[in-house]
Image (cartoon, helix red, strand yellow):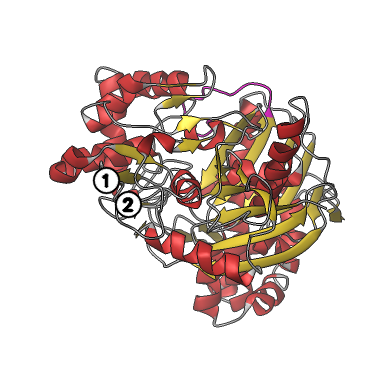
Amino acid sequence: MPLVAGVDTSTQSCKIVVRDAETGTPVRTGSAKHPDGTEVDPRHWWDAFQEAAAAAGGLSDVAALAVGGQQHGMVVLDADGNVIRPALLWNDNRSAPSAEALIAELGEGSRDAGAQAWADAVGSVLVASLTITKLRWLHDNEPENAARVAAVALPHDWLSWRIAGYGPAGDPTAPLGPQLDKLFTDRSDASGTGYYDAATSQYRPDLLERALGRADVVLPRVVGVAEAGAVAHASVAGSSVDGGALIGPGAGDNAGASLGLGMTPGDIAISIGTSGVVSAVAPKRTADGSGAINGFADATGNALMLAVTLNAARVLDAAREVLDVDFDGLADLALQAPPGSDGLVLVPYLEGERTPNRPDATGTLHGIRLATSTRHHLARAYIEGMLCGLADGLDALRAQGVSVDRVMLIGGAAQSPAVQQIAPQVFGLPIGIPEPGEYVADGAARQAAWVLASAGDPAAVAPAWSTTIATTLDADPKPVIRDQYAAVRDLTEAN
């Protein structure tokens, strides 16, 4: 029974699942926390990976592994493989002005023309999340660091490279040294950089040069969907397996979750995590010049369209803080208020927003009256506001002609009784809730099993591990919720 491991190096933690390669049966798991912040020294990811691997009983017996990771994070390396500065994460908004500058430049002064030009070139209109904007910020604000850049990687690329035994010169945990040309990645994560076109499967050095001022840097090799990028160093994994443990191409976190859920064209996943994500698998990517939809790649050869909100589960965290309740208490309060919360509406841009692109916006609360100044009205308004932002993302996908055949709600907040009752009212659709799981790590494990099978049979397909829908929620549209939200959504000071 060969074993495979899936690694999720997310914003908050590193999680590892070990599964049977043939059946997908879980064998063991481990996890470790990452530090908070919007910039993080990548060594913390390496330390957390090692801690999580130990908690999972070690990886000496796995025949293959793959890493799913937070998209967009900027990891810059010098010629000796050293990390030059802490990685800027996807949720670091300091590069928002850089995004606007790059858009205007490509549009020769016209933002609308520039936005469409970027969407045509790489599938996405630039926002602060994308790696290319962070490179422009580096060029403009830390020119000495920018001049030292010899390679640019993403979080999952860098961790896969370290697992293979590479790393800074002289580091005893990197016995193979700083071989930058051994960096590798996959189409899904590369497609979120802003300098890779998934439609042609090629990097765009001309766009990279616009940001960093030069293009003479090493970029990770983009490997095939079921191709091994390297072999894990025996000190890390696979020491008891003939030939060592193969390392799969990995994936961006949303593509990893899509693979873990077994999504195919027509499937929609609405994820309520640190960020809110409405994702759809389709045969071809979009080129949405409005910026509402990012046209990325998935981990199977299809496209993955995303509408992303910065404010998701953290909106519920804020509500719990304001009301001094736990998650169950928040749900109990919210379900005591009627749909629409009697006119109390939260626009939940508590940390700026990405969709719509308003990095400097603030949250607003409308419809406050004596009758709505209750704890249960406020609890429901927070939940409805969060879900309305995600529903706008679903509408944007429909506007791009994306098929909506099946909707799944995932993430920790999907288990809230209030979220489960209110979501069908906001979305107006039947919704399936899969069994709780580590979808990104599970997707990485499934990819590892695919890579292992392809090593013996190049025609092998991804194993058909099933995803069980634990709960199906019937459609229960309450138009008042979204009508109220639409009426006040744009009444924000910073548009």
- Magenta span includes 291: yes
Question: What residue range appears in magenta?
Answer: 282-295
Type of amino acid at the residue the image marks with label 2: Pro
Q: Quadrant of residue 279?
A: top right
Task: Give the residue at the far left of this rendering.
Answer: 144
Q: Quadrant of residue 462?
A: top right
Looking at the picture, how far across and down is residue 155, in whole percent? 45, 48
Question: Badge 2, how many Cα within 10 Å: few under 14, some, many 20+?
Answer: many
Q: Residue at x 74, y 29 (%)?
A: 265
- Quarter holding the C terminus is top left
Q: Which residue is mark 2?
A: 168
Q: Is residue 199 left or right of residue 376?
A: left
Q: CA distance from mark 1 to mark 2?
A: 6 Å
Q: Quadrant of residue 97?
A: top left
Q: Is residue 140 left or right of residue 185?
A: left
Q: Residue at x 57, y 23 (%)?
A: 286
Image disc number at residue 80: 1
Looking at the picture, how far across and down is residue 227, in whole percent? 62, 32
Type of amino acid at the residue the image marks with label 1: Asp
Above or below — where is 68 with respect to 54? above
Q: Residue at x 31, y 42 (%)?
A: 134
Question: Badge 1, how many Cα within 10 Å: few under 14, some, many 20+?
Answer: some
Q: Nearer the viewer, residue 322 or 220?
A: 220
Looking at the picture, how far across and down is residue 254, in whole percent? 60, 44
Looking at the picture, how far across and down is residue 159, in whole percent? 47, 51
